[in-house]
Image (cartoon, rainbow, N blue to C red):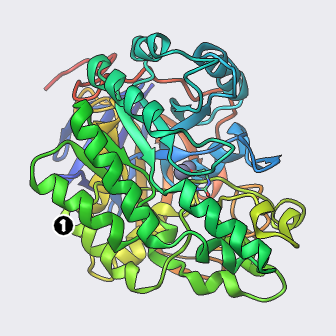
Amino acid sequence: MSLLIRGGRVITAADDVVADVYIEDETVTLIGRSLDVQAERVIDATGKYVLPGCIDPHTHLDMPFGGTVTIDDFESGQISAAFGGTTCHVDFCIQGRGQTFAQALETWHAKANGKTLIDYGFHIAVTDLREGGSLEELATLPDQGVTSYKLFMAYKGALMVDDETLFRAMEVAARSGALAMVHAENGDAIDVLVQQALAAGNTAPQFHALTRPPELEGEATNRAIQLAHVAGCPLYVVHVTCKEAVDPIQRAREQGWQVFGETCTQYFFIDSTFLERPNFEGAKYVYSPPARDASNHDVLWNAVRTDALSAISTDHCSFLWDGQKTLGRDDFTKIPNGGPGLEDRLKMIHHFGVGQGRITLNRMVDLLATTPAKLFGLYPRKGTIAVGSDADIVIFDPAKRETISAASHHSRCDYNLYEGTEVVGAPEVVLLRGRVLVENGELVASPGVGRFVRRARFGEQLAPTGATVSG
Ligand code: URP
Ligand code: ZN
Ligand code: ZN
């Protein structure tokens, strides 16, 4: 099958040119002006942006958490992603207590099998190095294309690991070519504050944020950075929310340390007052780390603009408000932590980031596609538009007006964090390896087309496949 995308504005992290993109089977094989080629299908992209498919390096689909399971599985989550212009994601495979990593991976592969619309990889969430997975087993994961793992410094009594486990895992990352990731909040101190809040009868959603102050994110971020430096491994700090955490990341980067920070769409738009909304509406905004004081919104925009932070993910972890979030009506600690967003990232960042002059189009592509691809061993097969790369492409209409709403999104979640927000600019056609997934608001592919990607080790490239380079 051949496809020609004619006359669009092809935007990568580095370039911005009007060109034709020719695709043979799954791969981009030619890029140039007025290409003289025959194609089985031609899409006129005049006036549109032609972007690399976005990569979401942080999602939780079909994940048991907080006494329930996320409402989006691989099918609904990936459909939602595709509509939003995301063609690849890296999901967290959670090691259950006592489970080996092989068992955890088998469970996560089974969750995805037959349901996938976009390509995907797995990070391992390391929860136990004593009874289940061992350091030796952890060291073998890059051989299976699992080249990153997350350690939780919070969620005491559930996913949290101690500093010894964190440090030992970092040492394994250093010698096996993996990227260590941390959820950086001081879980011990949070636990004390939570017990004090409950003892004082403070059970409403806003106490979720009040018991997880930004200093405890800053402390854990700095601790993880120093530990990773001693262990000699690269470090990726997930879901950074505030100045207290941006500052140590920026300092480490200025010293040339291999430290990278990610923030998520919601941290630019939601602030801690949302948790005070009446009638338990505030529970919709309960995720960790929590929404912060609004002064942090500009801190984060500045950080992504200046490369203090390197990527924007969604941390999509969706629970129904009615029936799941409401488990915590009488006790905020029982509200499952997480929010939806897989579908909204590109539209929100384009409208409020590019449209309002905070970042350039190139930087948007870098934050949503290219840098995630580079850090997580997907580049240059994914994350850019180049000869030899997978033809994962978004034809984006910069003039299309949309109102974001749970009534029209494709997640199963019964609310949207950005309900009623009007944006200008939205995906029109989304391609995965040359196959049209979404066109003019319709899903035109069937579950099963997405593939597991064996990712390259940190710092290594993922060889493009199937390229017939001509011209
Ligand atoms: O509240 C959140 N972020 N839920 C997902 C788990 C995590 O910490 O990433
Ligand atoms: Zn986390
Ligand atoms: Zn997460």
Compared across the picture, whether 407 is left or right of 395 comes to: right
Could you say which is closer to the camera, residue 430 or residue 423? 423
Amino acid type assigned to the residue bearing label 1 in the image: Thr
Could you say which is closer to the camera, residue 459 or residue 132? 132
Q: Is residue 383 visible?
A: no
CA neighbours of label 1 inside 10 A, class few (<14), some (14 to 19), many (20+): few
The residue positioned 43% from the left and 45% from the top of the image is: 182
Q: Please determine whether, in this image, residue 427 is positioned above or below residue 20.
A: below
Q: Please identify the quarter of the rendering in which residue 62 is found.
A: top right
User: Can you give x and y, in whole percent of width and height, for residue 3 in the image?
Assistant: 40, 35
Q: Please determine whether, in this image, residue 52 is positioned above or below residue 126.
A: below
Q: Please identify the quarter of the rendering in which residue 21 is found.
A: top left
> Mark 1 CB in 8 Å range of ligand 2?
no
Compared across the picture, whether 249 is left or right of 351 comes to: left
Q: Please identify the quarter of the rendering in which residue 113 is found.
A: top right
The residue positioned 22% from the left and 31% from the top of the image is: 232
The residue positioned 64% from the left and 37% from the top of the image is: 445
Q: Name the quarter where the N terminus is drawn.
A: top left
User: Can you give x and y, in whole percent of width and height, for residue 297 in the image?
Assistant: 39, 79
The residue positioned 16% from the left and 45% from the top of the image is: 257
User: Can you give x and y, in whole percent of width and height, for residue 416 in the image?
Assistant: 68, 70
Identify the residue under disc 1: 306
User: Outermost residue toward the left?
Assistant: 255
User: Can you give x and y, in whole percent of width and height, for residue 91 in the image?
Assistant: 55, 38
Q: Is residue 315 visible?
A: yes
Secondary structure found at label 1: helix
